[in-house]
Image: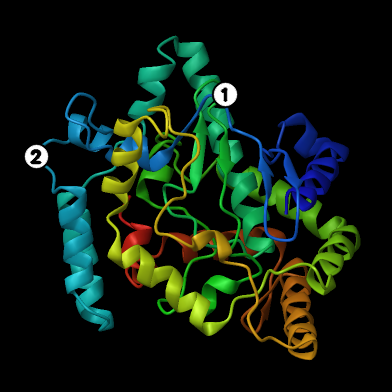
Amino acid sequence: MQQVFSLVNQLLAGAAETRQRQLKIRTYKVIPLSQKCGLLQWCEGTQPLGEYLTRTSSSSPGAHARYRPKDWLVKDCRSHLTKAGTAAEKRFKAYQEICAHFKPVFRHFFMENFPEPSVWFEKRLAYTRSVATNSIVGYILGLGDRHVMNILIDLQTAELVHIDLGIAFDMGHILPTPETVPFRLTRDIVDGMGVTGVEGAFRRCCENTMHVMKDNSESLLTIVQVLLYDPLSHWSLTPQQALDIQRKREQANQDNVVQTLISSGQVPSSGQAIGIFGPGESDIGLKTNESRENQNKLAERTLLRLKQKLNGLEGNAQLSVSGQVNFLIQKASDPRNLCKLYAGWQPYL
């Protein structure tokens, strides 16, 4: 996946519009040592969004506790959404109640870290561009599991770094609680963009990125095809593995896990190496008893959907670039889609 991101960066650097806006995906080095293990580069100077927003440390609480102390607690929001069950209307009502008692605060990140007005504006723009690029590329590649501990923010550049890429190529659609949004565009994410929100810079950068993806679809499809058909590449999920992912997260309170690691010194308080939500999740991509024939059929379907995305085919309609981007933004921010997500994804953040 990092190789795919590197190719995307070359394509973005080769187009005038995206090069001018410095659109790119933040990557990190990966060195495979065997089929099941390897080395990952440490992402220096970054912090998970979830740690900044919802940290529970009494000495340094998260932004929601500091700026909105009278709002519901994060654990109460999660519990309220879980108790709503799976009925669509009940879940939608519960989500609306959470939103009424839990307001976004991510704009304060830029005030805290970049108090100089010109720097504040520059970093907020860099953040907006980074969100746009990651959203479109992530959608094309079907990248899922984008909860707030799988997205890091660089404390110097304000760019996003996505980690834990085990669920890709729309595998999030087969989870026990299927993912219903194309990328993460929740209220806190939008709050960091300023008063214009998804309009202006974000929308333009999404359209510019989508143009580059479409114009270079053959190059993109070639490298993805190699990945999908590679007999050593384990990218698909079995139904049991999909079930295990959310079961393990249901059993563990992610805030307590992270805070325990921080307090014990196993993870620095700046917290770059996150993604620890239960034992065994590092095996997300491993196949069990899956024949090559079945994997090839799955690869064919995945490639077909990838081609449809690059051709602007959404549902039964053929959309222009601006139309497709507008469709995706609406889908990603629709409360009726967000309320259906797994509670651990924390769609209210």
SS for dot 1:
loop
Instruction: Choose top left, top right, bottom left or bottom right for residue 326.
Output: bottom right
Residue type beneath disc 2: Lys
Query: Front-most of 74 and 98?
Result: 74
Query: 52 above or below 72?
Result: above
Q: Which residue is denoted by mark 2 in the rendering?
A: 70
For the question of whether residue 341 can be seen, the reply is no
Against 81, residue 63 (above or below) is above
Residue 96 horizontal/vertical position (percent): 21, 63
Determine the residue located farthest toward the left in the rendered image. Answer: 70
Point 34% across, 33% down: residue: 262
**CA distance for labels 2 and 1:** 31 Å
Count of numbered marks: 2
- What amino acid does circle 1 point to? Thr
The image's mark for residue 280 is: none
Q: Specify the quadrant of the image occupied by residue 190.
A: top left
Label 2 packing within 10 angstroms: few (<14), some (14-19), many (20+): few
> What percent of the width, then of the height, locates residue 241?
51, 76
| Residue 290 shown left or right of residue 161 in the figure | right
Q: Is residue 292 left or right of residue 234?
A: right
Which of the two labelled residues, at mark 2 and mark 1, occupies the earlier sequence position? 2
User: Which numbered dot is residue 157?
Assistant: 1
In the rendered image, the vertical position of residue 195 relative to residue 199, given as above or below: above
Crowd band around label 1 with a 10 angstrom C-alpha radius: few (<14), some (14–19), many (20+): some
